[in-house]
Every structure is written in structure tokens, then in C-alpha cells.
Amino acid sequence: MFVYFVRHGETEFNKKRICQGHKDSPLTLRGVRSAEKHGKRLSKERIGIIYSSDLGRCVETARIINKFLRVGVVRVSELRERDFGYFNGRSYDEIKRKLNLSNPSEVAPGGESFNQMKNRVLLFLKKVGSECFEKVVVVSHKGPLRAILSEFYKTNFVSGECDSSSENIYLLEVRDGKIMDVKVIE
């Protein structure tokens, strides 16, 4: 199966350097245009379905992409961003003073660790791999993509190999629940 992984478009919180986690803010005009660009690009593929994080910024991105694809959209909580608990909706500067963001096991107060988020995202990929579609789109967040890339490259999630852009589409080949290949589509 091939998974076209798209990060949600830029949001107002992104511009203000506020950690969204499980909170939401609307897409900016740049975020809307990015989603439209992805929709046009993906319309050339034979996509069977879109799986989207159930958080509003991803649902909005998926809705825009789906104007071009016209397939079913399934909202999935397993694709959510890391839950930063108390720190959802707070500035990154504040979070960096109180939470070690490079420690994948550190649990955010009232939230989860990076590793907990990674486990749920990878379990979703295994589950979706048993579906009948050959090509799917996943609309999610930076954290889940970092989790996928850290698994594929067998590296720490803060590694440069796990950096990503919301302007790119990441093509994952998934076989038997394992990530076999990752390509960047610009």
C-alpha cells in the first residue's frame, strides 16, 4: 500500500509559535493554498480514501484536498498530534523551559510522551495496511510524521532526517505493517 502523508496547512497558532497539541486554530491563507496545491497534485493519483486526524486543522486540510479527489474521508483520533496536556495552546518558549522536548519518554503533564504518540501512529499504519485500498492519503501533523520518519530511519526523532515541511507530500510504502520506503514529493 502507498500512503501519501500530508501535514495540515499552516495555522494561526503556527504563525504565533504556539503549541497546538490537541487544541486548534484555523488555517491561514497560506495553509489553505498549500492544501489546494496538495489536492491538485494528488488528483493525478488513484486515491481510494483519505484518513485525517480528527483535529480541526487536519479536517479542514482534508476537506480542501478532497475537493480535488472526491473520495471518502475518515476522521481518526490515532493520527492526532502529541497531547501536550497542560501545555496545549501555550508558547513553545514556555514549553522549552519546563519540558525536555528531546526526551521521547518524557510525559507532558496531563498529556503523553512522544513515544506514546509514536506507538499509536504506528499501530494505525499497521491497521490501515490491511485495508483494501492501494493508495490512501493521510492528513496529520508534524509529530506523527516525525514518528514515522524516526521509525523508518531508525533514528532519534530530533534527528535532521526527521525534519519535514508542510509544503511537501511524503510517499510511504507500507507492506505488512512495516514502512518499506519513504520519498518526498515536492
Image: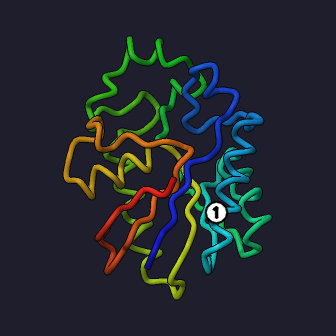
Residue closest to the eye, 127 or 141: 141
Q: Is residue 44 above or below residue 170?
A: below
| Residue positioned 43% across, 74% down in the render | 127
| Residue positioned 58% across, 39% down in the render | 22
**Colour setup of the view:** rainbow
Q: Is residue 48 above or below residue 65?
A: below
Relative image position of residue 167 (x, y in whole percent): 56, 45
| Residue positioned 69% across, 69% down in the render | 73
Q: How many labels does the image show?
A: 1
> Considering the numbered disc 1 on the image, is that residue within a helix, a strand or a loop?
helix
Relative image position of residue 101 (x, y in whole percent): 34, 27
Amino acid found under the numbered disc labelled 1: Arg
Residue closest to the eye, 86 or 92: 92
| Residue positioned 73% across, 38% down in the render | 27
Dot 1: few (<14), some (14–19), or many (≥20) neighbours within 10 Å?
Answer: some
Residue carrying label 1 = 41
Quarter placement of the N terminus: bottom left
Relative image position of residue 89 (x, y in whole percent): 60, 25
Residue closest to the eye, 146 or 94: 146
Q: In which quarter of the image is residue 156?
A: top left
Left or right of residue 82, residue 70 in this image = right
Left or right of residue 36, residue 172 in this image = left
Residue closest to the eye, 131 or 165: 165
Left or right of residue 39, residue 104 in this image = left
Q: Which residue lies furthest to the bottom in this view?
A: 132
Q: Residue furthest left?
A: 154
